[in-house]
Image: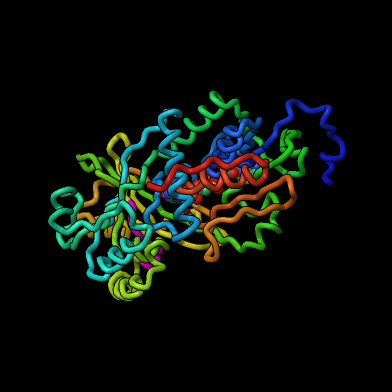
Amino acid sequence: MSEMTKFVSSEQAGPRFDVAVVGAGIVGLAHALAAARAGLRVVVIERDLRANGASIRNFGFITVTGQARGEIWRQARRARDVWGEIAPRAGIAVEHHGLVLNLRRPESVAVAEAFLATEMGEGCELLAVTELKQRYPEIAAPDALGALYSPHELRVDSPSALPRLVDWLARDYGVVFRTGEAVLNVAPPVIETSRGAVFAERAVVCPGDDFATLFPERIEAYRPRRCRLTMLRLADPGFRWPAGVMSDLGLTRYRGYADLPEAQALKRRLEAEQGPHLANGVHLIAVQNADGSLVVGDSHHYDDLPAPFAPAEAETLILDEFEQATGLVPPPVLARWTGVYASSDERGYFVDAPSPEVRLVMVTSGTGASTAFAIGEATIADLCGVPAPVPAPAR
Ligand SMILES: Cc1cc2nc3c(=O)[nH]c(=O)nc-3n(C[C@H](O)[C@H](O)[C@H](O)COP(=O)(O)OP(=O)(O)OC[C@H]3O[C@@H](n4cnc5c(N)ncnc54)[C@H](O)[C@@H]3O)c2cc1C
Protein backbone atom coordinates (compact mmCIF):
# COMPACT_ATOMS: atom_id res chain seq x y z
CA MET A 1 0.00 0.00 0.00
CA SER A 2 1.43 3.38 -0.96
CA GLU A 3 1.51 6.44 1.29
CA MET A 4 -1.27 7.99 -0.75
CA THR A 5 -3.52 4.94 -0.32
CA LYS A 6 -3.03 5.14 3.43
CA PHE A 7 -4.03 8.73 3.94
CA VAL A 8 -6.73 9.40 1.34
CA SER A 9 -10.10 7.90 2.11
CA SER A 10 -12.81 7.61 -0.52
CA GLU A 11 -15.07 9.90 1.54
CA GLN A 12 -12.64 12.75 0.92
CA ALA A 13 -12.71 12.17 -2.78
CA GLY A 14 -14.59 13.79 -5.63
CA PRO A 15 -16.66 11.69 -7.99
CA ARG A 16 -16.15 7.96 -7.90
CA PHE A 17 -15.81 6.33 -11.29
CA ASP A 18 -16.53 2.81 -12.42
CA VAL A 19 -13.43 2.67 -14.58
CA ALA A 20 -10.22 4.71 -14.65
CA VAL A 21 -8.18 4.47 -17.84
CA VAL A 22 -4.50 5.40 -17.71
CA GLY A 23 -3.23 6.81 -21.01
CA ALA A 24 -5.14 8.70 -23.72
CA GLY A 25 -3.48 7.00 -26.71
CA ILE A 26 -5.71 5.01 -29.02
CA VAL A 27 -5.58 1.95 -26.74
CA GLY A 28 -6.73 3.97 -23.73
CA LEU A 29 -9.44 5.72 -25.75
CA ALA A 30 -10.67 2.38 -27.08
CA HIS A 31 -11.14 1.13 -23.53
CA ALA A 32 -12.84 4.37 -22.53
CA LEU A 33 -15.23 3.98 -25.47
CA ALA A 34 -16.09 0.37 -24.64
CA ALA A 35 -16.68 1.18 -20.97
CA ALA A 36 -18.72 4.30 -21.72
CA ARG A 37 -20.88 2.43 -24.20
CA ALA A 38 -21.59 -0.13 -21.49
CA GLY A 39 -23.04 2.72 -19.43
CA LEU A 40 -20.10 2.98 -17.04
CA ARG A 41 -18.71 6.22 -15.57
CA VAL A 42 -15.23 6.64 -17.00
CA VAL A 43 -12.23 8.85 -16.29
CA VAL A 44 -9.16 8.95 -18.53
CA ILE A 45 -5.91 10.17 -16.97
CA GLU A 46 -3.13 11.30 -19.30
CA ARG A 47 0.19 12.78 -18.26
CA ASP A 48 0.61 14.86 -21.42
CA LEU A 49 -1.82 17.57 -22.50
CA ARG A 50 -3.14 15.07 -25.01
CA ALA A 51 -1.82 11.97 -26.76
CA ASN A 52 1.46 12.90 -28.40
CA GLY A 53 3.13 9.54 -29.00
CA ALA A 54 2.61 6.59 -31.33
CA SER A 55 -1.13 7.17 -31.58
CA ILE A 56 -0.78 10.50 -33.37
CA ARG A 57 2.53 9.81 -35.16
CA ASN A 58 1.19 6.84 -37.08
CA PHE A 59 -0.23 6.53 -40.60
CA GLY A 60 -3.78 6.29 -39.30
CA PHE A 61 -4.02 3.34 -41.64
CA ILE A 62 -6.65 0.98 -40.22
CA THR A 63 -5.30 -2.18 -41.76
CA VAL A 64 -7.10 -5.51 -42.00
CA THR A 65 -5.43 -7.27 -44.93
CA GLY A 66 -1.98 -8.46 -43.91
CA GLN A 67 -2.65 -8.64 -40.16
CA ALA A 68 -1.54 -11.88 -38.51
CA ARG A 69 -3.90 -14.73 -39.27
CA GLY A 70 -6.43 -15.63 -36.57
CA GLU A 71 -7.14 -13.44 -33.58
CA ILE A 72 -5.36 -10.23 -34.71
CA TRP A 73 -6.96 -10.38 -38.16
CA ARG A 74 -10.39 -10.84 -36.56
CA GLN A 75 -9.73 -7.99 -34.15
CA ALA A 76 -8.76 -5.76 -37.05
CA ARG A 77 -12.01 -6.52 -38.87
CA ARG A 78 -14.04 -5.69 -35.78
CA ALA A 79 -12.01 -2.53 -35.03
CA ARG A 80 -12.36 -1.36 -38.63
CA ASP A 81 -16.14 -1.67 -38.26
CA VAL A 82 -16.04 0.37 -35.06
CA TRP A 83 -13.98 3.09 -36.79
CA GLY A 84 -16.48 3.10 -39.66
CA GLU A 85 -19.37 3.45 -37.26
CA ILE A 86 -18.00 6.12 -34.92
CA ALA A 87 -16.07 8.27 -37.41
CA PRO A 88 -19.14 10.17 -38.70
CA ARG A 89 -20.54 10.57 -35.19
CA ALA A 90 -17.28 11.94 -33.84
CA GLY A 91 -16.70 14.18 -36.88
CA ILE A 92 -13.67 12.17 -38.01
CA ALA A 93 -13.07 12.17 -41.76
CA VAL A 94 -12.19 8.91 -43.49
CA GLU A 95 -9.64 10.14 -46.03
CA HIS A 96 -9.71 7.06 -48.24
CA HIS A 97 -10.64 3.37 -48.27
CA GLY A 98 -8.84 0.19 -49.30
CA LEU A 99 -5.31 -0.95 -50.04
CA VAL A 100 -3.37 -1.34 -53.29
CA LEU A 101 -0.26 -3.48 -52.80
CA ASN A 102 1.83 -3.20 -55.95
CA LEU A 103 3.51 -6.47 -56.99
CA ARG A 104 6.77 -6.17 -58.91
CA ARG A 105 8.21 -9.70 -58.67
CA PRO A 106 6.83 -13.11 -59.62
CA GLU A 107 7.51 -14.26 -56.04
CA SER A 108 5.25 -11.45 -54.79
CA VAL A 109 2.46 -12.54 -57.11
CA ALA A 110 2.82 -16.07 -55.68
CA VAL A 111 2.42 -14.72 -52.12
CA ALA A 112 -0.64 -12.70 -53.15
CA GLU A 113 -2.19 -15.77 -54.80
CA ALA A 114 -1.55 -17.88 -51.71
CA PHE A 115 -3.03 -15.14 -49.52
CA LEU A 116 -6.17 -14.98 -51.65
CA ALA A 117 -6.66 -18.72 -51.22
CA THR A 118 -6.97 -18.30 -47.43
CA GLU A 119 -10.00 -17.04 -45.51
CA MET A 120 -8.18 -13.70 -45.19
CA GLY A 121 -8.47 -13.15 -48.93
CA GLU A 122 -12.24 -12.78 -48.79
CA GLY A 123 -13.29 -9.64 -50.67
CA CYS A 124 -9.72 -9.03 -51.96
CA GLU A 125 -8.62 -9.28 -55.60
CA LEU A 126 -5.50 -9.91 -57.62
CA LEU A 127 -5.35 -7.22 -60.29
CA ALA A 128 -3.57 -8.08 -63.51
CA VAL A 129 -1.19 -5.39 -64.73
CA THR A 130 -3.64 -4.11 -67.36
CA GLU A 131 -6.34 -3.76 -64.72
CA LEU A 132 -3.94 -2.06 -62.32
CA LYS A 133 -2.97 0.47 -64.98
CA GLN A 134 -6.61 1.05 -65.88
CA ARG A 135 -7.90 1.45 -62.33
CA TYR A 136 -4.92 3.15 -60.69
CA PRO A 137 -2.79 4.63 -63.50
CA GLU A 138 -1.14 7.24 -61.25
CA ILE A 139 0.43 4.70 -58.91
CA ALA A 140 1.29 1.80 -61.22
CA ALA A 141 5.06 1.30 -61.49
CA PRO A 142 6.38 0.72 -65.05
CA ASP A 143 7.57 -2.77 -64.04
CA ALA A 144 4.44 -3.71 -62.05
CA LEU A 145 3.19 -7.24 -62.58
CA GLY A 146 -0.14 -6.49 -60.92
CA ALA A 147 -1.49 -5.64 -57.49
CA LEU A 148 -3.27 -7.11 -54.52
CA TYR A 149 -6.37 -5.02 -53.84
CA SER A 150 -8.19 -5.05 -50.52
CA PRO A 151 -11.41 -3.08 -49.88
CA HIS A 152 -11.24 -3.43 -46.08
CA GLU A 153 -8.99 -0.57 -45.00
CA LEU A 154 -9.82 2.92 -43.74
CA ARG A 155 -7.49 5.85 -43.37
CA VAL A 156 -7.90 8.57 -40.74
CA ASP A 157 -5.60 11.49 -39.97
CA SER A 158 -4.62 10.59 -36.40
CA PRO A 159 -3.41 14.03 -35.22
CA SER A 160 -6.87 15.46 -35.88
CA ALA A 161 -8.88 12.25 -35.34
CA LEU A 162 -7.78 11.61 -31.75
CA PRO A 163 -8.75 15.04 -30.38
CA ARG A 164 -12.14 14.63 -32.07
CA LEU A 165 -12.56 11.23 -30.47
CA VAL A 166 -11.73 12.75 -27.08
CA ASP A 167 -14.25 15.59 -27.57
CA TRP A 168 -16.95 13.18 -28.65
CA LEU A 169 -16.36 10.82 -25.71
CA ALA A 170 -16.59 13.76 -23.33
CA ARG A 171 -19.62 15.31 -25.02
CA ASP A 172 -21.77 12.28 -25.82
CA TYR A 173 -20.72 9.86 -23.09
CA GLY A 174 -19.64 12.15 -20.27
CA VAL A 175 -16.14 10.66 -20.13
CA VAL A 176 -13.97 12.83 -17.88
CA PHE A 177 -10.45 13.63 -19.14
CA ARG A 178 -7.75 14.61 -16.67
CA THR A 179 -4.66 15.71 -18.56
CA GLY A 180 -1.22 16.88 -17.47
CA GLU A 181 -1.55 14.34 -14.65
CA ALA A 182 0.78 11.35 -14.31
CA VAL A 183 -0.50 8.20 -12.65
CA LEU A 184 1.96 6.99 -10.02
CA ASN A 185 0.17 3.99 -8.52
CA VAL A 186 -2.92 1.97 -9.36
CA ALA A 187 -4.68 0.16 -6.50
CA PRO A 188 -8.47 0.55 -6.94
CA PRO A 189 -10.37 2.25 -5.54
CA VAL A 190 -7.39 4.62 -5.27
CA ILE A 191 -5.57 5.79 -8.37
CA GLU A 192 -2.67 7.85 -7.12
CA THR A 193 -1.61 10.65 -9.42
CA SER A 194 0.82 13.55 -9.51
CA ARG A 195 -2.12 15.78 -8.56
CA GLY A 196 -3.67 13.70 -5.79
CA ALA A 197 -6.05 10.77 -5.96
CA VAL A 198 -8.80 9.64 -8.31
CA PHE A 199 -11.30 7.04 -7.16
CA ALA A 200 -12.48 4.23 -9.39
CA GLU A 201 -13.71 0.67 -8.88
CA ARG A 202 -11.53 -0.68 -11.65
CA ALA A 203 -8.64 0.48 -13.79
CA VAL A 204 -7.18 -0.22 -17.22
CA VAL A 205 -3.55 0.81 -17.71
CA CYS A 206 -2.60 1.55 -21.34
CA PRO A 207 0.89 3.04 -21.06
CA GLY A 208 2.09 2.63 -24.67
CA ASP A 209 5.87 2.22 -24.64
CA ASP A 210 6.38 3.29 -21.00
CA PHE A 211 7.65 0.08 -19.42
CA ALA A 212 9.00 1.74 -16.27
CA THR A 213 6.28 3.62 -14.40
CA LEU A 214 3.37 1.26 -13.65
CA PHE A 215 3.70 -2.48 -13.07
CA PRO A 216 7.23 -2.62 -14.53
CA GLU A 217 7.84 -6.16 -13.30
CA ARG A 218 4.60 -7.38 -14.92
CA ILE A 219 5.55 -5.70 -18.20
CA GLU A 220 9.07 -7.15 -18.07
CA ALA A 221 7.63 -10.68 -18.02
CA TYR A 222 6.34 -10.09 -21.58
CA ARG A 223 9.79 -8.90 -22.73
CA PRO A 224 8.68 -6.00 -24.91
CA ARG A 225 11.23 -3.90 -26.77
CA ARG A 226 10.88 -0.46 -28.20
CA CYS A 227 10.78 0.12 -31.92
CA ARG A 228 11.56 3.48 -33.55
CA LEU A 229 10.09 4.39 -36.92
CA THR A 230 11.00 7.11 -39.41
CA MET A 231 8.11 8.94 -41.08
CA LEU A 232 7.81 11.59 -43.80
CA ARG A 233 5.19 13.99 -45.08
CA LEU A 234 5.50 14.69 -48.79
CA ALA A 235 3.92 17.47 -50.82
CA ASP A 236 0.63 16.91 -52.65
CA PRO A 237 1.37 14.77 -55.73
CA GLY A 238 -1.43 16.62 -57.57
CA PHE A 239 -4.10 13.93 -57.58
CA ARG A 240 -6.38 12.15 -55.11
CA TRP A 241 -4.58 9.11 -53.74
CA PRO A 242 -6.88 6.17 -54.44
CA ALA A 243 -6.12 3.97 -51.41
CA GLY A 244 -3.35 3.10 -48.99
CA VAL A 245 -0.40 2.00 -51.11
CA MET A 246 2.11 -0.69 -50.17
CA SER A 247 4.84 -2.61 -51.99
CA ASP A 248 6.54 -6.03 -52.20
CA LEU A 249 8.46 -5.30 -48.99
CA GLY A 250 5.21 -5.34 -47.00
CA LEU A 251 4.67 -8.99 -47.96
CA THR A 252 7.62 -10.07 -45.84
CA ARG A 253 6.79 -7.74 -42.95
CA TYR A 254 3.05 -8.16 -42.36
CA ARG A 255 2.49 -11.57 -40.80
CA GLY A 256 -0.74 -12.32 -42.66
CA TYR A 257 1.46 -12.70 -45.76
CA ALA A 258 4.90 -13.31 -44.27
CA ASP A 259 3.81 -16.45 -42.37
CA LEU A 260 2.69 -18.12 -45.62
CA PRO A 261 5.25 -20.63 -46.95
CA GLU A 262 5.30 -18.78 -50.31
CA ALA A 263 6.85 -15.73 -48.60
CA GLN A 264 10.17 -17.55 -48.12
CA ALA A 265 11.15 -17.34 -51.79
CA LEU A 266 10.26 -13.65 -51.86
CA LYS A 267 12.28 -13.03 -48.71
CA ARG A 268 15.35 -14.65 -50.30
CA ARG A 269 14.98 -12.52 -53.40
CA LEU A 270 14.50 -9.31 -51.41
CA GLU A 271 17.55 -10.13 -49.28
CA ALA A 272 19.59 -10.34 -52.46
CA GLU A 273 18.08 -7.24 -54.09
CA GLN A 274 17.12 -4.93 -51.21
CA GLY A 275 19.46 -5.79 -48.33
CA PRO A 276 19.74 -2.20 -47.02
CA HIS A 277 15.94 -1.83 -46.97
CA LEU A 278 15.59 -5.02 -44.93
CA ALA A 279 18.48 -4.09 -42.62
CA ASN A 280 16.67 -0.82 -41.81
CA GLY A 281 13.29 -2.50 -41.53
CA VAL A 282 12.03 -0.36 -44.41
CA HIS A 283 8.77 -1.10 -46.13
CA LEU A 284 6.27 1.20 -47.82
CA ILE A 285 2.99 2.65 -46.69
CA ALA A 286 1.78 5.79 -48.44
CA VAL A 287 -1.50 7.47 -47.52
CA GLN A 288 -2.98 10.92 -48.16
CA ASN A 289 -4.18 13.78 -45.97
CA ALA A 290 -7.16 16.01 -46.69
CA ASP A 291 -4.80 18.78 -47.89
CA GLY A 292 -3.31 16.42 -50.48
CA SER A 293 -0.01 15.85 -48.70
CA LEU A 294 1.16 12.25 -48.33
CA VAL A 295 2.24 10.44 -45.18
CA VAL A 296 4.95 8.00 -46.23
CA GLY A 297 7.11 5.55 -44.30
CA ASP A 298 8.65 3.73 -42.65
CA SER A 299 11.72 2.12 -41.10
CA HIS A 300 12.01 -0.02 -37.95
CA HIS A 301 14.94 0.13 -35.52
CA TYR A 302 14.75 -1.84 -32.28
CA ASP A 303 16.40 -0.46 -29.17
CA ASP A 304 15.59 -0.18 -25.47
CA LEU A 305 16.71 3.44 -25.71
CA PRO A 306 15.43 4.72 -29.08
CA ALA A 307 17.86 7.23 -30.56
CA PRO A 308 16.39 10.72 -30.89
CA PHE A 309 17.63 11.17 -34.45
CA ALA A 310 15.94 9.99 -37.64
CA PRO A 311 18.57 8.18 -39.74
CA ALA A 312 19.11 9.82 -43.14
CA GLU A 313 19.71 6.42 -44.73
CA ALA A 314 16.23 5.29 -43.75
CA GLU A 315 14.72 8.36 -45.41
CA THR A 316 16.64 7.71 -48.62
CA LEU A 317 15.53 4.09 -48.66
CA ILE A 318 11.88 4.95 -48.00
CA LEU A 319 11.87 7.49 -50.84
CA ASP A 320 13.59 4.95 -53.10
CA GLU A 321 10.91 2.35 -52.38
CA PHE A 322 8.18 4.94 -52.97
CA GLU A 323 9.63 5.69 -56.41
CA GLN A 324 10.17 2.02 -57.33
CA ALA A 325 6.71 0.93 -56.22
CA THR A 326 4.65 3.78 -57.68
CA GLY A 327 6.80 5.01 -60.58
CA LEU A 328 6.43 8.54 -59.14
CA VAL A 329 9.29 10.91 -58.43
CA PRO A 330 8.77 11.57 -54.70
CA PRO A 331 7.30 15.05 -54.09
CA PRO A 332 9.35 17.32 -51.78
CA VAL A 333 9.64 16.32 -48.13
CA LEU A 334 7.60 18.72 -45.97
CA ALA A 335 8.15 17.15 -42.55
CA ARG A 336 10.06 14.37 -40.84
CA TRP A 337 9.40 12.69 -37.52
CA THR A 338 10.05 9.55 -35.56
CA GLY A 339 7.64 7.51 -33.50
CA VAL A 340 8.16 4.72 -30.98
CA TYR A 341 5.95 1.78 -30.12
CA ALA A 342 6.15 -1.29 -27.89
CA SER A 343 7.14 -4.39 -29.83
CA SER A 344 7.47 -8.13 -29.25
CA ASP A 345 8.42 -11.05 -31.48
CA GLU A 346 6.28 -13.34 -29.37
CA ARG A 347 2.86 -11.67 -29.38
CA GLY A 348 0.88 -8.91 -31.06
CA TYR A 349 -0.56 -7.61 -27.78
CA PHE A 350 -1.11 -8.64 -24.20
CA VAL A 351 -3.70 -8.08 -21.50
CA ASP A 352 -2.31 -8.74 -18.04
CA ALA A 353 -4.22 -8.81 -14.74
CA PRO A 354 -2.07 -7.42 -11.90
CA SER A 355 -5.18 -7.77 -9.67
CA PRO A 356 -8.85 -8.70 -10.24
CA GLU A 357 -9.73 -4.98 -10.60
CA VAL A 358 -6.86 -3.99 -12.89
CA ARG A 359 -5.89 -4.77 -16.45
CA LEU A 360 -2.64 -3.78 -18.13
CA VAL A 361 -3.00 -3.60 -21.91
CA MET A 362 -0.17 -3.22 -24.39
CA VAL A 363 -0.22 -3.59 -28.17
CA THR A 364 3.20 -4.94 -29.12
CA SER A 365 3.03 -5.14 -32.89
CA GLY A 366 2.59 -1.68 -34.32
CA THR A 367 -1.08 -2.36 -35.02
CA GLY A 368 -2.85 -0.47 -32.26
CA ALA A 369 -4.84 1.87 -34.50
CA SER A 370 -6.11 -1.22 -36.34
CA THR A 371 -7.01 -3.41 -33.38
CA ALA A 372 -7.51 -1.34 -30.20
CA PHE A 373 -11.29 -0.98 -30.46
CA ALA A 374 -11.71 -4.77 -30.50
CA ILE A 375 -9.21 -5.29 -27.67
CA GLY A 376 -11.01 -2.61 -25.64
CA GLU A 377 -14.38 -4.32 -26.02
CA ALA A 378 -13.02 -7.69 -24.93
CA THR A 379 -11.06 -6.30 -21.98
CA ILE A 380 -13.94 -4.22 -20.62
CA ALA A 381 -16.32 -7.19 -20.99
CA ASP A 382 -13.95 -9.35 -18.98
CA LEU A 383 -13.04 -6.74 -16.35
CA CYS A 384 -16.47 -5.24 -15.78
CA GLY A 385 -18.73 -8.22 -16.48
CA VAL A 386 -20.63 -6.42 -19.22
CA PRO A 387 -21.57 -8.20 -22.44
CA ALA A 388 -19.15 -7.62 -25.31
CA PRO A 389 -20.90 -6.11 -28.35
CA VAL A 390 -21.81 -8.75 -30.88
CA PRO A 391 -19.83 -8.10 -34.07
CA ALA A 392 -21.81 -7.92 -37.26
CA PRO A 393 -21.41 -11.00 -39.46
CA ALA A 394 -18.10 -11.06 -41.35
CA ARG A 395 -18.27 -9.28 -44.69
C1 LIG B 1 5.32 5.87 -36.79
C2 LIG B 1 4.21 4.89 -36.44
C3 LIG B 1 3.34 4.47 -37.44
C4 LIG B 1 2.31 3.58 -37.11
N1 LIG B 1 1.35 3.30 -38.04
C5 LIG B 1 0.27 2.57 -37.69
C6 LIG B 1 -0.82 2.41 -38.57
O1 LIG B 1 -0.87 3.01 -39.64
N2 LIG B 1 -1.82 1.58 -38.22
C7 LIG B 1 -1.85 0.96 -37.01
O2 LIG B 1 -2.76 0.21 -36.73
N3 LIG B 1 -0.87 1.16 -36.10
C8 LIG B 1 0.17 1.96 -36.41
N4 LIG B 1 1.17 2.19 -35.50
C9 LIG B 1 1.06 1.58 -34.18
C10 LIG B 1 0.08 2.33 -33.30
O3 LIG B 1 0.22 3.72 -33.50
C11 LIG B 1 0.33 1.93 -31.85
O4 LIG B 1 0.17 0.52 -31.72
C12 LIG B 1 -0.66 2.62 -30.91
O5 LIG B 1 -0.68 4.01 -31.13
C13 LIG B 1 -0.33 2.35 -29.45
O6 LIG B 1 -1.29 3.06 -28.71
P1 LIG B 1 -1.14 3.25 -27.16
O7 LIG B 1 -2.34 3.98 -26.69
O8 LIG B 1 -0.83 1.94 -26.52
O9 LIG B 1 0.21 4.09 -26.98
P2 LIG B 1 0.54 5.64 -27.00
O10 LIG B 1 0.01 6.32 -28.19
O11 LIG B 1 2.00 5.72 -26.74
O12 LIG B 1 -0.26 6.22 -25.76
C14 LIG B 1 0.08 5.89 -24.43
C15 LIG B 1 -0.28 7.09 -23.58
O13 LIG B 1 -0.19 6.74 -22.20
C16 LIG B 1 0.31 7.86 -21.51
N5 LIG B 1 0.90 7.36 -20.25
C17 LIG B 1 1.84 6.39 -20.12
N6 LIG B 1 2.10 6.20 -18.81
C18 LIG B 1 1.31 7.06 -18.12
C19 LIG B 1 1.14 7.34 -16.74
N7 LIG B 1 1.80 6.68 -15.79
N8 LIG B 1 0.23 8.29 -16.37
C20 LIG B 1 -0.48 8.97 -17.32
N9 LIG B 1 -0.35 8.75 -18.64
C21 LIG B 1 0.53 7.80 -19.03
C22 LIG B 1 1.34 8.45 -22.46
O14 LIG B 1 1.61 9.81 -22.16
C23 LIG B 1 0.68 8.26 -23.80
O15 LIG B 1 -0.08 9.40 -24.21
C24 LIG B 1 2.21 3.07 -35.79
C25 LIG B 1 3.11 3.49 -34.81
C26 LIG B 1 4.10 4.40 -35.12
C27 LIG B 1 5.04 4.85 -34.05
Q: Which residues are magenta?
A: 278-285
Residue 55 rendering spot, x and y as whole percentages: 49, 44
Query: Residue 318 vs residue 62: left or right?
Result: left
- The quarter holding residue 7 reads top right
- The quarter holding residue 83 reads top left
Closer to the camera in the image, 121 or 213: 121
Q: Main secondary structure of the magenta part?
A: loop
Residue 312 rendering spot, x and y as whole percentages: 37, 58
- The residue drawn where x is 27% and y is 59% is 320
- The residue drawn where x is 29% and y is 74% is 269
Q: Is residue 186 above or below residue 276?
A: above
Q: Is residue 166 above or below residue 266?
A: above
Q: Is residue 284 magenta?
A: yes
Closer to the camera in the image, 121 or 15: 121
- The residue drawn where x is 57% and y is 49% is 208
Query: Residue 203 vs residue 147: left or right?
Result: right
Residue 100 rendering spot, x and y as whole percentages: 27, 52
Residue 248 rendering spot, x and y as whole percentages: 29, 63
Say how the picture is coloured. rainbow
Does the rendering let one see residue 313? no
